[in-house]
Image: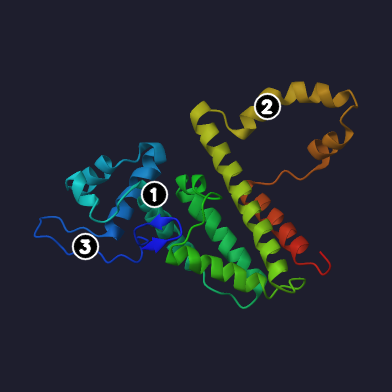
Amino acid sequence: MDTPYGSVPLPVWERPEPQPRAASVALSRAKIAAAAIRIADADGLDGLSVRKIAKELGVGPMRLYDYVINRSELLDLMVDTVYARIAEVGQHPGWRDTVLAVAHRTRAAALEHEWFVDLLGARPHLGPHALAVGEANAAALSQAPGVRGVDDLQRALGVLNAFLVGALRREITERRTARSTGTDVSAWQAAHGPYLTRMLATGRYPTVARLVVDGAHLDAEETFHRNLAAILDGITAPGS
């Protein structure tokens, strides 16, 4: 395909699957993506390699290059496979219910496939299922009060996506840290509690003290839901 930036291959979703070979193991992009996801779930993206995928599938590594030309295409297929599960939530009767359903399904996908968050917020995801999720969110938000045109819609989507990326990366980072150090949030708080108590007793941080003492301490799921609700209240309010 010729573009202003030179000649580039067609996107992986627009290239037909290679003709099947007379081989003992049949391949497809879906099978390759599924194997790659299993490896990434176990070993992270750093542990993902063509050689490992080929071994998982029982084929030679070079056969995979008939289906994906580089690592970027492989990651695109993996990401879009995850988006396919997110897209299953579909449209709900109300715009807010749709956005909430998509966001919570996205969080569930990130918790199941932690590597997914490492690929959020970078280059746009343009696979068919990623586009379906984007369409669901955009169509829902376009019906929200306070979203009066395309400029409002772009801002609303930008704020929503920024929240999702930040919230999910923070939650997954905390999970990874707990695994790598053997210290969960409760243990970390207990270890730093005496120091924090002394610092707050100085009176120099009264607002932080209110948050620590009087603020609600919710679990991760409830925190995500309440913060998401606050985001939706803000970005869709008339005059916002």
Q: Give the residue pinned by disc 1.
A: 72
* Residue 190: image tag: 2
Secondary structure category for the residue under label 1? helix
Q: Residue furthest bottom?
A: 93
Q: In which quarter of the image is residue 134?
A: bottom right
Q: Nearer the viewer, residue 75 or 228?
A: 75
Marks 2 & 1, CB-CB < 8 Å contact: no
First-in-chain label (3 vs 1): 3
Residue 89 percent location from the top left of the image: 51, 69
In which quadrant of the rendered image does the N terminus lie?
bottom left
Kind of residue sitting beneath label 2 = Ala
Q: Nearer the viewer, mark 2 or mark 3?
A: 3
Residue 169 horizontal side relative to residue 17, left or right: right
Kind of residue sitting beneath label 3 = Pro
In which quadrant of the rendered image does the C terminus lie?
bottom right
User: Is disc 1 surrounded by few (<14), some (14 to 19) or many (20+) residues within 10 Å?
Assistant: few
* Residue 18: image tag: 3
Residue 90 horizontal side relative to residue 148, left or right: left
User: Is disc 2 surrounded by few (<14), some (14 to 19) or many (20+) residues within 10 Å?
Assistant: few
Q: Which of 142 and 179 is in front in this view?
A: 142
Kind of residue sitting beneath label 1 = Ser
Residue 14 percent location from the top left of the image: 34, 66
